[in-house]
Image (cartoon, rainbow, N blue to C red):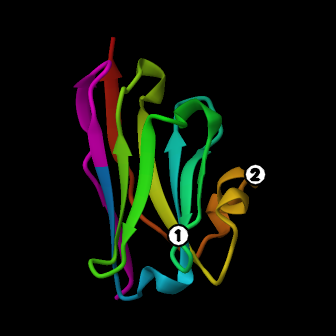
Amino acid sequence: DVQLQASGGGLVQAGGSLRLSCAASGFTFDDYAIGWFRQVPGKEREGVSCISGSDGSTYYVDSVKGRFTISSDNAKNTVYLQMNSLKPEDTGVYYCAAIGGFVLPIAVCTTQGFYYGMDYRGKGTLVTVSS
């Protein structure tokens, strides 16, 4: 049974930190590109950060550069999103998703609607940053 499970969301004050986890079962990340996407009511789902499981290359949307770090532990089949210096505008539901093959992280994160065509998509985890 193939699953992606996102976790780690919560309520945090501005300036705080959270670490999101995206755990996979039924497949391995080595041959997949993984993305973290954020959904805010009234806005399009946005690619926040993406990583290639095969070569570790990464992409970050400008608004999170220097604050968020994406990493992959292939032994644990888990991708993490370390979020530091959180801002109220980081609030949203965060989803992780995976697509097989070598796909550039920038393409995964920035192609409009790409998320909906990815091979595996997990349920989201809510991040709320209070001011």
The residue closer to the viewer here, 13 or 66, is 66
112, above or below 43, in the image? below
User: Residue at the top extreme?
Assistant: 131
Disc 1 is placed on an element classified as: loop
Quadrant into which the N terminus falls: bottom left
Residue drawn at x 70%, y 60% is 114
Relative image position of residue 27 (x, y in whole percent) = 41, 87
Residue drawn at x 27%, y 39% is 18
The residue closer to the viewer here, 56 or 3, is 56
Mark 2 and mark 1: Cα distance apart in space: 22 Å
- Horizontal relation, residue 37 to residue 73: left or right: right
Find residue 3 and report its image quarter.
bottom left
Q: Which mark is residue 119?
A: none
Relative image position of residue 79 (x, y in whole percent) = 38, 65
- Horizontal relation, residue 119 to residue 81: left or right: right
Residue drawn at x 69%, y 57% is 106
Relative image position of residue 89 (x, y in whole percent) = 48, 22
Q: Which residues are magenta?
A: 1-19
Residue with the mark numbered 2: 112
Residue 8 within the segment the image draws in magenta: yes
The first of marks 2 and 1 along the sequence is 1
Residue 70 within the segment the image draws in magenta: no
Residue with the mark numbered 1: 56
Tell me how many marks there are. 2
Mark 2 residue type: Gln
Structural crowding at the residue carrying mark 1, measured as other residues with C-alpha within 10 Å and reported as few (<14), some (14–19) or many (≥20): some
Mark 1 residue type: Gly
Disc 2 is placed on an element classified as: loop
